[in-house]
């Protein structure tokens, strides 16, 4: 069985492209109340504000480009195929796709998509900030960004947990965590325990909560800063040249 690479990324992956993070001191939640613009129990009470907030997020995407980190992951997936290189991300932007990645699994939804609360239809609005607030299929006037709000269940969490749980049982596999605080998705779901034999790599601007010793390699930096070394390390992992006994 060929080795696999499973990547789990957060906002830190896209921050170097100019995408605002949510939880940093100058992030989006410092500017907007998440309980008003991103909570399933209150979003209808703040309907116009919600659409204003997500409209601005879509418009931002028209003016940013993938960074070196996105391109590293896309190149690895193109080289080894999406069956061997799985990319799971909390990010709702399309920068991985712009870089050439395919079958990216957006666990919290996709910013360019809208969904109808009436008929369930899903459609793309691209990078438009201002959109018609009705469903093009049934005419319903209650439509929602196709992103997971607080208080909602993320439907692909279950599949994600299964994939990572199975992957980390095999020593030839590699689990990579990039640019996440671990506050939303617990890292136990992704990397498991230190006794799990898969090779584990962390790339983050600062140490994250939990036992850092379970990672075989740590880059306390942005993904852009680590991109060259990460591409070398991950290529060697996929080729069977980098083991726990031999590391850079």
Image (spheres, helix red, strand yellow):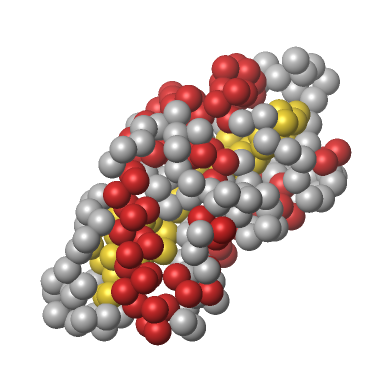
Between residues 129 and 110, which one lies in front from this camera angle? 129
Residue 107 against residue 35 in the figure, above or below? above
Q: Quadrant of the C terminus?
A: top right
Determine whether, in the image, residue 88 is placed left or right of residue 168.
left
Residue 192 visible in this rendered orientation of the protein: yes
Residue visible at 49% across and 83% down in the picture: 41
- Position of residue 132 measured from the top left corner of the image (x, y, whole percent): 17, 68
Q: Residue at x 48, y 46 (%)?
A: 20
- Most foreground residue, 2 or 5: 5
- Residue 143 is drawn in which quadrant? bottom left
Please give left or right for residue 214 compared with residue 164 in the image.
right
The residue drawn where x is 67% and y is 29% is: 221
The image shows residue 114, relative to residue 95, as above or below, that is: below
| Residue 34 percent across, percent down from the top left | 52, 68
Where the N terminus falls, by quadrant? top right
Q: Nearer the viewer, residue 33 or 246?
A: 33
Residue 225 rendering spot, x and y as whole percentages: 60, 23
Residue at 53%, 74% in the rendered image? 35
All told, the count of numbered labels is: 0
Residue 160 appears in view:
no
* 114, 121: nearer the viewer: 114
| Left or right: 112 as drawn, with respect to 46 | left
Which quadrant of the figure has residue 100?
Answer: top left
Is 200 positioned to the left or the right of 137 in the image? right
Where residue 115 appears, as percent x and y from the top left, is 29, 70
């Amino acid at each position: 069985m060929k080795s696999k690479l499973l990547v789990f990324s957060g906002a830190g992956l896209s921050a170097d492209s100019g995408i605002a993070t949510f939880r940093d001191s100058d992030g989006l939640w410092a500017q907007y109340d998440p309980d008003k613009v991103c909570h399933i129990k209150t979003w209808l009470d703040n309907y116009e504000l919600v659409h204003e907030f997500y409209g601005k997020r879509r418009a931002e995407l028209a003016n940013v480009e993938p960074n070196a980190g996105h391109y590293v992951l896309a190149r690895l997936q193109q080289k080894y195929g999406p069956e061997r290189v799985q990319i799971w991300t909390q990010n709702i932007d399309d920068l991985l796709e712009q870089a050439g990645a395919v079958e990216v699994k957006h666990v919290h939804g996709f910013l360019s998509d809208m969904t109808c609360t009436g008929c369930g239809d899903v459609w793309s609005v691209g990078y438009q900030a201002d959109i018609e607030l009705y469903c093009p299929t049934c005419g319903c006037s209650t439509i929602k960004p196709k992103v997971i709000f607080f208080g909602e269940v993320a439907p692909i969490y279950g599949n994600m947990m299964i994939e990572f749980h199975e992957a980390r049982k095999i020593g030839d596999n590699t689990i990579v965590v990039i640019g996440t605080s671990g506050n939303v998705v617990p890292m136990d779901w992704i990397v498991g325990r230190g006794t799990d034999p898969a090779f584990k790599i962390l790339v983050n601007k600062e140490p994250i909560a939990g036992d850092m010793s379970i990672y075989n390699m740590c880059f306390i930096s942005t993904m852009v800063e680590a991109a060259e070394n990460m591409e070398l390390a991950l290529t060697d992992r996929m080729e069977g040249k980098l083991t726990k006994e031999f590391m850079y």
